[in-house]
Image (cartoon, rainbow, N blue to C red):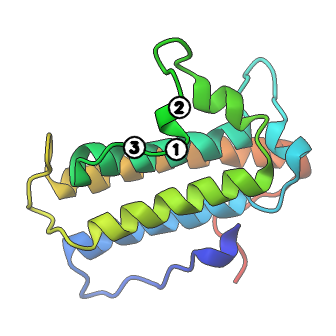
């Protein structure tokens, strides 16, 4: 899953926005590495007492990408599979179904969501207010926070599955 995300080192002259985007992309790269290359058994494995799975994490972060983009940048309704989910009846729908979805579907869903977010972000400025809520700068911070939290979960889950450890994928 890491072959689609490559992060170049941050320039010493980088702007605040470039630094925020760098942090987000680096966290995405780490997440892709920690969740990549696993079969359905690996993506659906739990580590009690938690019911969290790497498949659930992938689907959750795809939802977060699409939700932030829809709510704060484009204002467009979220598409499939989110428009079919009844989150009122099943608030953990993405976590539950992500544990049983096929790996190729999960990876495609996440990469698609990341691509939509990148495209939407390419046309806005950091100080520009969002459609509803904080400015772009805050959106970047919040999205990065979401990844930082879940990369830590992915670290622990992946190590328990096959022993993979480290901060960044090998170059």
Q: Is residue 108 above or below residue 90?
A: below
Q: CA distance from mark 1 to mark 2?
A: 7 Å
Is residue 128 or residue 82 the one in the foreground?
A: 82
Is residue 151 or residue 103 the one in the foreground?
A: 103
Residue for badge 3:
78
Q: Residues within 10 Å of mark 1 (few under 14, many from 20)?
A: few
Is residue 164 or residue 66 the one in the foreground?
A: 66
| Residue drawn at x 81%, y 48% as measured from the top left | 159
| Residue drawn at x 52%, y 18% as measured from the top left | 91
Q: Residues within 10 Å of mark 3 (few under 14, many from 20)?
A: some
- Residue 94 image offset from top left, x and y in percent: 60, 32
| Residue drawn at x 20%, y 57% as measured from the top left | 137
* CB atoms of marks 1 and 3 within 8 Å: no
- Residue 109 image offset from top left, x and y in percent: 60, 54
Q: Residues within 10 Å of mark 2 (few under 14, many from 20)?
A: few
* CB atoms of marks 1 and 2 within 8 Å: yes
User: For residue 50, which quarter of the picture?
Assistant: top right
Residue 80 is left or right of residue 163, and the answer is left
Residue 84, disc: 2
Q: Secondary structure at mark 2?
A: helix
Residue 94 is left or right of residue 126, and the answer is right
* CB atoms of marks 3 and 2 within 8 Å: no
| Residue drawn at x 45%, y 84% as measured from the top left | 9
User: For residue 46, which quarter of the picture?
Assistant: top right
User: For residue 15, which quarter of the picture?
Assistant: bottom left
Q: CA distance from mark 1 to mark 3?
A: 7 Å
Residue 80, disc: 1
Where the N terminus falls, by quadrant? bottom right
């Amino acid at each position: 899953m890491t072959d689609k995300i490559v992060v170049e080192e941050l320039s010493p002259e980088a702007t605040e926005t470039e630094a925020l985007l760098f942090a987000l992309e680096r966290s995405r790269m780490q997440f892709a590495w920690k969740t990549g290359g696993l079969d359905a058994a690996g993506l659906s494995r739990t580590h009690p007492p938690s019911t969290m799975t790497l498949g659930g994490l992938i689907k959750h972060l795809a939802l977060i990408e699409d939700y932030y983009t829809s709510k704060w940048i484009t204002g467009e309704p979220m598409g499939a599979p989110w428009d079919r989910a009844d989150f009122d009846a099943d608030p953990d729908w993405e976590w539950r179904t992500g544990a049983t979805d096929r790996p190729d579907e999960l990876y495609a869903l996440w990469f698609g969501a990341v691509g939509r977010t990148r495209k939407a972000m390419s046309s806005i400025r950091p100080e520009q207010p969002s459609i509803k809520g904080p400015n772009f700068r805050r959106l970047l911070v919040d999205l990065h926070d979401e990844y930082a939290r879940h990369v830590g979960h992915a670290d622990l889950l992946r190590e328990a599955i096959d022993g993979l450890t480290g901060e960044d994928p090998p170059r």
